[in-house]
Image (spheres, rainbow, N blue to C red):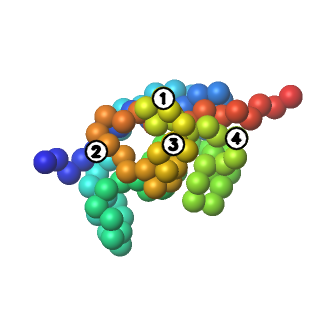
Amino acid sequence: MTDTLKLSIQFGGGAELLFDKIKKREVELPALKKYFPESLKEKWAIRELLVWIKDNLLKERPELFLQGDSVRPGILVLINDADWELFGELDYELQANDTIMFISTLHGG
């Protein structure tokens, strides 16, 4: 068994502007305990993924992507093309080769 977890992370609807305009990234997360030594959990969940994204991918204006320990209202999160609400939102345990998509529904006018 490998210590890393491979995922596809995608940004759309303008969210990609916060990530150097890159819409799709293939990422390899380290073992959870290596990144969060204090964690009592063994598996990555969306909650930890958001911290990792903030630390490693987010380039500007984190307040437009994150609010507290979750995404801002107006950011739609899809897990393998389905609404994250169907999977427990922040508590969803990530699986190898998952595709996590963040779509901003907020637009200026």
Q: Amino acid at mark 1?
A: Asp
At which x and y percent is residue 80? 43, 32
Residue identifier under label 4 = 74
User: Which of disc 4 and disc 1 is earlier in sequence?
Assistant: 4
Q: What kind of residue is marked 2?
A: Leu
Q: CA distance from mark 4 to mark 3?
A: 17 Å
Secondary structure beneath label 2:
strand
Count every numbered label the image shows and give the total.
Answer: 4
| Residue located farthest toward the right when viewing the structure as drawn | 109
Secondary structure category for the residue under label 3: helix
- For the C terminus, give its image quadrant: top right
Mark 3 or mark 4, which is nearer the start of the sequence?
4
The residue labelled by disc 3 is 86
Residue at x-position 57% and y-position 59%: 69
Residue 59 can be seen, yes or no:
yes
Q: Which mark is residue 81?
A: 1
Decide which of tag 2 and tag 4 comes sooner along the chain: 2
Residue type (three-letter) at the residue carrying disc 4: Gly
Mark 2 to mark 1 CA distance (whole Å): 19 Å
Q: Residues within 10 Å of mark 4 (few under 14, many from 20)?
A: some
Q: Earlier in the sequence, mark 2 or mark 1?
A: 2
Which class describes the residues within 10 Å of circle 3: few (<14), some (14-19), or many (20+)?
Answer: few
Q: Position of residue 16 (x, y in %)?
A: 58, 31
